[in-house]
């Protein structure tokens, strides 16, 4: 993806943030809403080629059902989706737990769905594209709060530097007891794939999929752990 295309998407996301800010929605609330919508869109993308995966979102609560609505029906259906998904078992329910519909203007919601999110193939984007949007909104939100941005995320350049110094391996367990959005955990996982991906044995692959990262501070005692609690900012 070209830098111009990336910047265009970031600018478009910002334009909606400004519109919704004028409509009474804070930058943090907008970030939350766009996260829910992006999840639904990307879950739908995974059902299409080249992935052809089964949808983890039930029929009638998925992206196509949201895209088909308009006006007051759209606002009502979006609220229904968030409510019903919060009641689902497993990870899906965890993601949408306490989710609330906060975009009260159905016309703006429709524009956000159609003009920003549905136009792009988000699953094909590098993480930095979504990260640029997310971190920009967090930084803007931090300007509204005396606590600043440090409580939300650690800059990616700092994360990469720390992970490169720690050099996690495929047999390690990475523990971040203040994981926030999981930036350290994701960077550690990517580091192992980049440095050891071609030499992983079956046990290491299983470990990487299921137990390599711990986000709650309870690291298994029988494996080396990489702790980041000395870093005061949340990622």
Image (cartoon, grey):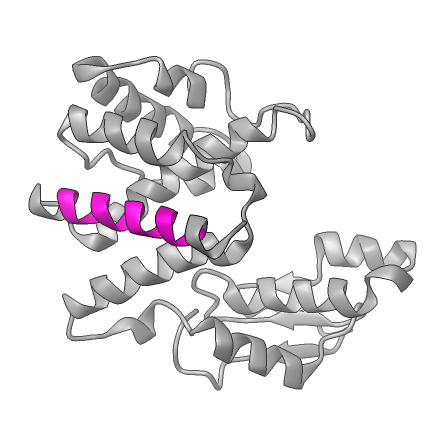
Image vertical order of residue 127 relative to residue 142, above or below: above
Q: Is residue 149 left or right of residue 210?
A: left
Image vertical order of residue 146 relative to residue 40, above or below: below
Q: Is residue 160 magenta?
A: no
Image quarter where the C terminus lies is: bottom left
Q: Is residue 74 left or right of residue 160?
A: left
Residue at 56% from the left image edge and 53% from the top image edge: 126
**Residue 113 in the image: x percent, y percent?**
32, 29
Q: Is residue 41 left or right of residue 104?
A: right
- The one nearer the camera, 103 or 84, is 103
**Which residues make up the magenta segment?**
6-20
Image vertical order of residue 206 relative to residue 49, above or below: below
Residue at 29% from the left image edge and 24% from the top image edge: 78
Image vertical order of residue 127 relative to residue 233, above or below: above
**Residue 191 in the image: x percent, y percent?**
69, 69
Residue at 69% from the left image edge and 29% from the top image edge: 50
């Amino acid at each position: 993806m070209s830098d111009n295309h990336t910047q265009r998407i970031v600018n478009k996301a910002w334009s909606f943030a400004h519109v919704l800010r004028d409509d009474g929605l804070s930058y943090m609330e907008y970030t939350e809403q766009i996260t829910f919508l992006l999840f639904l869109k990307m879950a739908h993308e995974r059902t299409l080629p080249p992935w052809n995966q089964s949808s983890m979102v039930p029929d009638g609560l998925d992206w196509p059902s949201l895209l088909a609505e308009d006006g007051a029906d759209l606002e009502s259906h979006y609220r229904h989706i968030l409510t019903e998904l919060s009641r689902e078992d497993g990870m899906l329910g965890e993601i949408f737990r306490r989710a609330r519909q906060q975009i009260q203007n159905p016309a703006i919601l429709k524009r956000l769905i159609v003009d920003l999110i549905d136009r792009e193939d988000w699953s094909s984007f590098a993480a930095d594209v979504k990260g640029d949007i997310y971190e920009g909104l967090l930084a803007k939100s931090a300007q509204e709060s005396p606590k600043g941005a440090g409580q939300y995320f650690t800059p990616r350049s700092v994360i990469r530097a720390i992970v490169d110094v720690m050099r996690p391996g495929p047999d390690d367990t990475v523990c971040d007891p203040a994981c926030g959005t999981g930036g350290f955990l994701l960077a550690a996982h990517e580091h192992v794939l980049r440095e050891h991906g071609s030499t992983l044995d079956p046990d290491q692959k299983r470990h990487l999929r299921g137990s390599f990262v711990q986000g709650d501070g309870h690291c298994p005692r029988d494996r080396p752990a990489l702790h980041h609690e000395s870093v005061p900012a949340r990622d």
